[in-house]
Image (cartoon, helix red, strand yellow):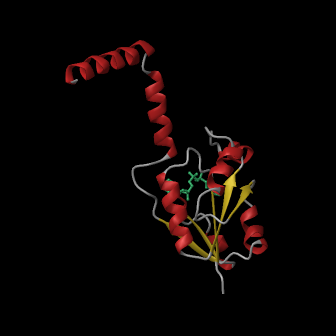
């Protein structure tokens, strides 16, 4: 009997932590459905996204192991989604451990270990740090690199 697994997330600035999660989920079932938080839902989560929903949806839809993408528009929809898509397993990273145990009455609930040393928050911080470097410092750095390259030619 084919098994269906579902997960929910923002998947902003898609990175290896997201990919490894989705790949592990697909190894657990025959069909993987990913519910992507809409921009409006993220405002409700208090989460500021860098990449708009349409692009996040297109990226995740093109991940080989993903079979279907739906919008995540509310916290409540998980209950209806489990019925609507005949879900066997709900799974999400363990940063949410325990938060969705109420689904245990309807399907298996699995919390997977997050991939270490990568997060959208970290990526945003690194980007913000880089953007805060004065433009002339960056130009100077590139000029130094060009000079050094000449020395090694
Ligand atoms: N993740 C991971 N490893 C990381 C970063 C993220 O395994 N280094 C997982 C998270 O645990 C989550 C998924 O990737 O299962 C998506 O992460 P987010 O986009 O941060 O998801 P979030 O905004 O927490 O949304 O209703 C549930 C929420 O919509 C979850």
Q: Is residue 42 above or below residue 8?
A: above
Q: Quadrant of residue 63?
A: bottom right
**Residue depicted at 65% across the width and 48% down the height:** 56
Q: Is residue 87 above or below residue 133?
A: below
Q: Quadrant of residue 140?
A: top left
In the rendered image, residue 47, in percent from the top left (x then y), is placed at 62, 43
**Residue depicted at 43% across the width and 57% down the height:** 115
In the rendered image, residue 53, in percent from the top left (x then y), is placed at 70, 45
**Residue depicted at 51% across the width and 62% down the height:** 21
Q: Quadrant of residue 150?
A: top left
- Quadrant containing ligand 1 reads bottom right
**Residue depicted at 75% across the width and 61% down the height:** 76
Question: Nearest the camera: 114 or 79?
Answer: 114
Find the residue positioned furthest to the left.
151
Question: Nearest the camera: 100 or 55?
Answer: 55
Please give the count of numbered marks on the rendered protein. 0
In the rendered image, residue 102, in percent from the top left (x then y), is placed at 66, 71
- Is residue 94 visible from the viewing direction of this image? no
Task: Locate the C terminus and report the quarter of the image it occupies.
Answer: top left
Left or right of residue 8: residue 119? left
In the rendered image, residue 80, in percent from the top left (x then y), is placed at 78, 68
Task: Locate the N terminus and report the quarter of the image it occupies.
Answer: bottom right
């Amino acid at each position: 009997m084919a098994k269906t697994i579902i997960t929910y997330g923002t998947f902003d600035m898609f990175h290896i932590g997201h990919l490894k999660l989705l790949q592990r989920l697909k190894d657990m079932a025959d069909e993987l459905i990913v519910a992507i938080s809409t921009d409006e839902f993220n405002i409700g989560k208090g989460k500021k996204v860098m990449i708009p929903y349409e692009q996040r949806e297109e990226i995740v839809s093109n991940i080989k192991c993903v079979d279907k993408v739906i919008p995540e528009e509310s916290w409540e929809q998980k209950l209806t989604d489990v019925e609507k898509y005949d879900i066997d397993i709900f799974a999400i990273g363990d940063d949410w451990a325990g938060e969705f145990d109420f689904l245990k009455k309807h399907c298996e609930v699995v919390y997977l270990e997050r991939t270490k040393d990568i997060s959208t928050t970290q990526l945003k911080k690194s980007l913000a740090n880089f953007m805060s470097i004065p433009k002339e410092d960056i130009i100077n750095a590139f000029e130094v690199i060009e000079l050094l390259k000449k020395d090694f030619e």
